[in-house]
Image (cartoon, helix red, strand yellow):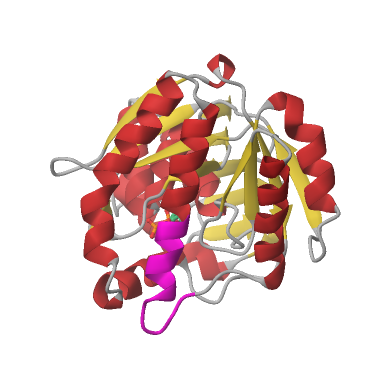
Amino acid sequence: MRATAIAQPNIALIKYWGKRDVVRNLPAVGSISITLSELQTQMSVDLDTDLPGDVLLVNGGEEPRFLPRISACLNDLLGEQRSFARISSHSNFPMAAGLASSASAFSALTMAAAGAADLSLSTRELARIAGRASGSAARSLYGGFVELKNDGDSIELESLMDAESWPLQVVLAITDTGRKETGSTEAMEISRKTSPFYDDWIVRQATDLDAARTAIEQRDFAGLAAIAEHNCLKMHSIMWASRPPIVYWKAATMRCLQTVRRLQGEGRSVFFTIDAGPQVKAVCLPEDTEVVREALSTTPGVKQVMTSGLGAGARLVKKT
Ligand code: DP6
């Protein structure tokens, strides 16, 4: 009745932005991501309790704010007649600041809860359940390069390549550790309802996915860099043109982009991507990691820099 799972966040190179079905949390577009190795969330679920309601501890402290989504995910997985759970989560990176904490949290939660309840579900089924809680979480059930396809009435996941086959590095530049003002769920709906660029984004996503898939297959770094930066800036353009506008960037976010441009001008293999937050993720080839890390950590306004390789999908580490 107790189990612990570990999952790593993933960073989308071709982004999920917008929902086709809000109730079932089906994404409006497919996406491609890389799962990280060094950032992680460890999640323990204890179903053997006589608690009057679910209890959630995040890094040792109670966090009732996140509880409704966690409880809903457990109901989805275990049914509403389940016993209440004690859930304890530890992450080694800042939460709710655009570092994909919901992806590692919900993928680890789904796997730990299924383990605690002794359910034997496939990775694909667990991914679908995690994805209903948070779209990007479905991808963290898998390692390396992962595609989430949105065709049909549910999502389909495909592992495009394992982490070892193309060992890219990611340097994460933290420009702000505060919690973001608008969560991605809400921001996506504002974009869908008000952004003049939203429909065009949906139509063009298939072309971007094709280009990224080909670049990954061929280990074409320049090709992947071009399509990932384009897709990222397109997603932020949708947000900037929404009403009210959604602007996650800080001044230091822009400075990091300029640092990446300078490094590219010096012949370094690096590109940027930015999610629903002000942090910049610089993806690079292993030989350029140190130079990228040094350049981003000395960029004004950068508070912290973390480096990660690519890693494995969510896994169960303990079951009692
Ligand atoms: C910008 O997965 O957090 O990181 O399904 O509403 O929980 P919900 O959204 P979420 O959105 C992630 C958005 C993104 C792009 C991406 O990861 O693909």
Q: Nearer the viewer, residue 320 or 24?
A: 24
List the single residue furthest toward the bottom: 244
Counting every numbered tag in the picture gives 0
Magenta region: 233-246
Does the rendering let one see residue 116? no
Which residue occupies 60% across, 69% down? 249
| The quarter of the displayed image where residue 35 is located | top right
- Figure quadrant, ligand 1: bottom left
User: Is 25 displayed left or right of 289 in the figure?
Assistant: left
Taking the magenta stretch, the answer to whether it contains residue 235 is yes
The answer to whether residue 262 of the structure is visible from this angle is yes
Residue 60: x %, y % from top left: 72, 56
Is 126 or 149 nearer to us in this picture?
149
301 vs 40: above or below: below
Magenta-colored stretch includes residue 67: no
Name the residue nearer the viewer: 185 or 264. 264
Which quadrant is home to the C terminus? top right
Find the residue positioned furthest to the left: 152
* Residue located 28% across and 57% down the image: 201
Q: Position of residue 171 (x, y in %)?
A: 70, 42
Asked if residue 157 lies left or right of residue 250, the reply is left
> Measuring 78% from the left and 50% from the top, which residue is drawn there?
296
Image position, residue 278 (x, y; %): 62, 64
